[in-house]
Amino acid sequence: MRPGAPTPLALKIFLALIIFLLVAAIAFKIAAIIYRKSLYRGIWLKFSSFSLTNGILGMILLFLFYEQVYFLAARFWFIVWLVSMGVWKYFIFKRILKIPEEREKWKKEMEYRKYIP
């Protein structure tokens, strides 16, 4: 429950992860804008919100870790954060697996609409 002082290497690694998540959020948002008429737009938006949310949570955890707040900087919060990231990614990838089915449904709908005046 009482974490020790963070090492400089641990801070740099953690900060690099947070910066990566925030940059990825911007990149995914740009991809959603580029592919706005695609079936993948929703996936890009989900990844963007995933990255942005976890980047902000990471900044909060980094602040608490740096300031050595006893309970809120405990190691189990990092584990909870990583597990929640894994669960969130599971649901995103589950959605990705449904895209071919939606594509077939969309093609059938376009084929049907072709004959309707």
Image (cartoon, grey):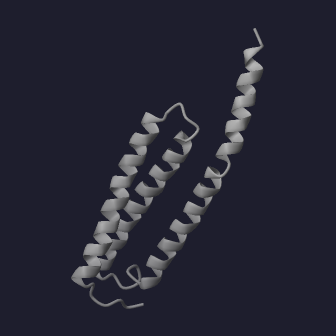
What is the tally of numbered marks visible in this picture? 0
Residue 61 vs residue 11, the one in the foreground: 11
Front residue of 48 and 70 = 48
Compared with 52, 9 (above or below) is below
Q: Residue at horizontal 54%, vertical 68%?
A: 86
Residue 63's spot in the image, x, y percent?
30, 72
Q: Nearer the viewer, residue 94 or 7?
A: 94
- Residue 116, quarter of picture: top right
Residue 21: percent from left, percent from top: 37, 59
Judged from this view, the residue extending furthest toward the top is 117
- 53 on left or right of 96: left
Q: Quadrant of the C terminus?
A: top right
Q: Taking 51 as reference, is 114 left or right?
A: right
Left or right of residue 32: residue 60: left
Q: Is residue 52 visible?
A: yes
Image point (27%, 76%), residue name: 11
> Residue at position x 25%, y 74% from top?
12
Residue farthest left in this picture: 8
Front residue of 57 and 92: 92
Name the quadrant of the N terminus.
Answer: bottom left
* Residue 113 horizontal/vertical position (percent): 74, 18
* Residue 57 in picture, x, y percent from top left: 40, 65
Q: Does residue 59 show up?
A: no
Residue at the image point whose x is 63% and y is 51% from the top: 95
Please determine whether, in this image, residue 40 is positioned above or below residue 19.
Answer: above
